[in-house]
Image (cartoon, rainbow, N blue to C red):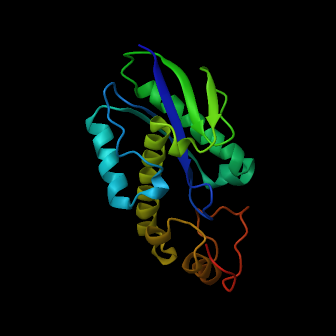
């Protein structure tokens, strides 16, 4: 039986940390009623849905592109790299029950893969597999940033996850760039309106 794989990312906009992608194949019979774009869900709901996907035996792959890669490649190409890595991780970990026939990716661009892949604008609101990938990627990245906050406690990564909040920008001005800072991203002055 052929399967559809959804891919989405989390973390294009932060000033620090990786961009994270997830590739998800939903199991047969999975009811996608709860699935939404991860940005429309709270952290507890995202975590509960991620656990439910795992319990339902969804096939999941995670891929990362690190700050040095983002600085070297730019965020667009680093995002496509994270997506390729997520798909490769999924293929390696897949139980091999069926071939993936097509990949759908949220946005305007799809990575080059060894199976047909197409981009779907607003796919994270339209395609259940992409919605699931959106949730898994967001949970994985948020967990990583929280844990990194334990290593570099002065930056508050456990709160803002590297996004350009006023607190994050203040910490960068006070402490200098963190070891996971995206050095190619401009840090706006603190007195400018924060996101």
Work out which residue is located at the far top of the displayed protein and give it. 1
* Image coordinates for residue 174, horizontal then vertical, percent: 61, 84
| Quarter occupied by the N terminus | top left
Taking the spot 57% from the left edge, 32% from the top edge, the residue there is 104
State which quadrant residue 31 falls in: top left
Taking the spot 58% from the left edge, 36% from the top edge, the residue there is 105
Q: Nearer the viewer, residue 183 or 106?
A: 106
Query: Where 156 falls versus 113 (above or below)?
Result: below
* Image coordinates for residue 195, horizontal then vertical, percent: 61, 72
Q: Which of 122 and 99 is in front in this view?
A: 122
How many numbered callouts?
A: 0
Taking the spot 48% from the left edge, 69% from the top edge, the residue there is 157
* Image coordinates for residue 119, horizontal then vertical, percent: 64, 35
Q: Nearer the viewer, residue 159 or 64?
A: 159
State which quadrant residue 77 falls in: top right
- For this view, does 38 lie left or right of residue 43? right
Question: Is residue 83 at least partly visible in the picture?
Answer: yes
Query: Where 162 falls versus 172 (above or below)?
Result: above
């Amino acid at each position: 039986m052929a399967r559809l794989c959804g891919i989405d990312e989390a973390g294009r906009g932060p000033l620090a940390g990786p961009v994270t992608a997830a590739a998800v194949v939903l199991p047969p019979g999975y009811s996608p009623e709860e699935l939404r774009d991860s940005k429309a869900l709270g952290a507890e709901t995202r975590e509960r849905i991620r656990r439910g996907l795992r319990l339902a035996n969804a096939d999941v792959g995670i891929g990362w592109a690190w700050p040095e890669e983002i600085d070297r490649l730019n965020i667009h190409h680093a995002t496509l790299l994270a997506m390729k890595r997520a798909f490769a991780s999924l293929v390696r970990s897949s139980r091999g029950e069926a071939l993936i026939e097509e990949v759908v990716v949220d946005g305007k661009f799809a990575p080059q893969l060894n199976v047909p892949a197409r981009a779907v604008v607003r796919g994270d609101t339209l395609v259940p597999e992409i919605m699931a990938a959106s949730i898994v990627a967001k949970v994985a990245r948020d967990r990583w940033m929280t844990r990194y906050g334990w290593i570099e406690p002065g930056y508050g990564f456990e709160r803002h996850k590297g996004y350009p909040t006023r607190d994050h920008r203040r910490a960068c001005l006070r402490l200098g760039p963190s070891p996971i800072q995206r050095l190619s991203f401009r840090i706006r002055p603190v007195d400018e309106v924060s996101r």
